Image (cartoon, rainbow, N blue to C red):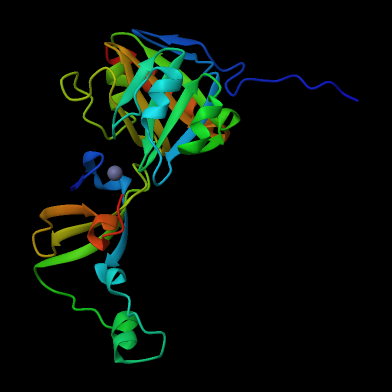
Amino acid sequence: MRIPCPLCGDRDHREFTYKGAAVALDRPGNSDWSDDWDSYIHLRDNPAGDTDEMWWHGAGCGGWLVVTRNTVTHEVKAARMAADVKGAGA
Amino acid sequence: MASLIAKSPCAGMAPISVGDAALREVDPGVITSLSPLAGGDVGALKAAHGMAFPAPGRASGKAGARAVWSGRGQAFLIGPAPDAALKAHFAMTDQSDGWAVLGLEGTAAREVLARLCPLDLRPDRFKRGHTARTLIGHMTGSVTRVGADSFDLMVFRSMAQTAVHEIEEAMKSVAARG
Ligand SMILES: [Zn+2]
């Protein structure tokens, strides 16, 4: 499996560490406990098909990526820098 | 008071020559990490040291005074001590003693590296002046093509002995195949 890092190009997956579903990008803004927090911490969709995941390119550029992967075929369809997805700049 | 004698990271381990590949230690000079500050001008590097701030995956300059992309939002200035004018444009840290730098050369160098790095090292894909942060064996490191059959490799200084050992094993393995 290869992941197309926007900075480094196509790279072997052993350079990356898997974090999980890309929910970290949708952290609830309010600090009080709510159903949003319950969902953020505990609930995952576990889809059979395309899903967005966080991968860390720790043995490469050091960037966090949002990778769109098909959980059935393992096809990697896209990868973006998480900072760009969040609009935080590079 | 005892007088301390500076030792290079790979002292006593290199040079090594096996078959058509040779490994030697490179004295990099000063290594400074440069991270562009918000609102800073990366052109300050060219003004001060003559080489462009490198794009991702690229190295600029030449032997003795190089800038090597070293990760997201970061490059290493390798060789000269950083000009004071850079301070206004980059966050800088001195990393000179943190890295072991090795030169791998020879017509078998690419084959040796192919046993250690998960990179496409074909000359039309990884050209002179291209660089990568990647794995060297099971270490994280930096690989830069500095010539047709010549690569500069960087690993954390604490990994120097492991790096030399693993590269030597790969050199022997390639040579044994003839
Ligand atoms: Zn990367």
Percent of width and height locating residue B105:
36, 11
The answer to which of B105 and A35 lies nearer the viewer is: A35
Q: Nearer the viewer, residue B72 or A45?
A: B72
- Residue at x-position 27% and y-position 15%: B177
Q: Residue furthest bottom?
A: A34
Q: Using the image, determine if residue A29 lies above or below residue A18.
A: below
x, y (%) of residue B102? Answer: 46, 20
| Horizontal relation, residue B48 to residue A6: left or right | right
Q: Quadrant of the N terminus of chain B?
A: top right
Task: Tell me the quarter of the picture where residue B132 sits.
Answer: top left
**Residue A60, quarter of the rendered image:** top left
Residue at 29 percent of width and 87 percent of height: A36
- Can residue B78 be seen from the camera position used here? yes
Q: Quadrant of ligand 1?
A: top left
Q: Quadrant of the rendered structure where residue B75 is?
A: top left
Q: Is residue B168 visible?
A: no
Q: Residue furthest right?
A: B1
Q: Give me the residue at 56% from left, 18% from top.
A: B13
Image quarter where the C terminus of chain B lies is: top left
Compared with A7, A83 (above or below) is below
The x and y percentages for residue B159 are 53, 33
| Image position of B146 (left or right of B97) | left
For the point 27% across and 57% down, which residue is it? Answer: A82
